[in-house]
Amino acid sequence: MKHAPEFRSKREEERAEMKNTPGYKLWSVMFMLLYPFIAIFTFLFSGIVMFFSGISRILAYLFGGSHVKH
């Protein structure tokens, strides 16, 4: 929440100062440019993990012995 300068807390002032640094601006630009790649990688990696998890479940069912009669 934005407050008038005379009512801003110390933390709000520190945060406003940090946003003016070159590092913060560089990080903001890099994150904006790289976000689509991060999102696509996450989507693909999740799909790969789900695929191998399915294979694992099938193999555990076939060879695990949980379906053996006692």
Image (cartoon, helix red, strand yellow):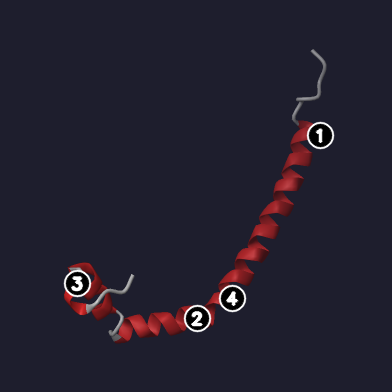
* Residue at position x 27%, y 74% in the image: 3
Separation (CA) of disc 4 from disc 1: 38 Å
Disc on the earlier residue, 2 or 3: 3
Separation (CA) of disc 4 from disc 3: 41 Å
Question: Where does residue 22 sit, x and y in percent of width and height?
Answer: 31, 87
Q: Which mark is residue 37?
A: 4
Q: Nearer the viewer, mark 1 or mark 2?
A: 2
Q: Nearer the viewer, mark 4 or mark 1?
A: 4
Question: Where does residue 32 sit, x and y in percent of width and height?
Answer: 50, 81
Disc on the earlier residue, 4 or 3: 3
Q: Nearer the viewer, mark 3 or mark 1?
A: 3
Give the residue number, with chain letter if any, for mark 3: 7
Disc on the earlier residue, 1 or 2: 2
Q: Are marks 2 and 4 in contact (CB under 8 Å)?
A: no
Q: Amino acid at mark 1?
A: Leu
* Residue at position x 74%, y 30% in the image: 64
Separation (CA) of disc 2 from disc 4: 10 Å
Q: Are marks 4 and 1 in contact (CB under 8 Å)?
A: no
Q: Would residue 60 be found to the left or right of residue 37 on screen?
A: right
Q: Is residue 50 above or below residue 45?
A: above
Question: How many other residues sit within 10 Å of disc 2, few (<14), some (14-19) or many (≥20)?
Answer: few
Disc on the earlier residue, 4 or 1: 4
Q: Amino acid at mark 4?
A: Phe
Question: Where does residue 38 sit, x and y in percent of width and height?
Answer: 56, 71
Q: Residue furthest top?
A: 70
Q: Which structural element holds mark 4?
A: helix
Q: Nearer the viewer, residue 59 or 12?
A: 12
Q: Nearer the viewer, residue 69 or 27?
A: 27
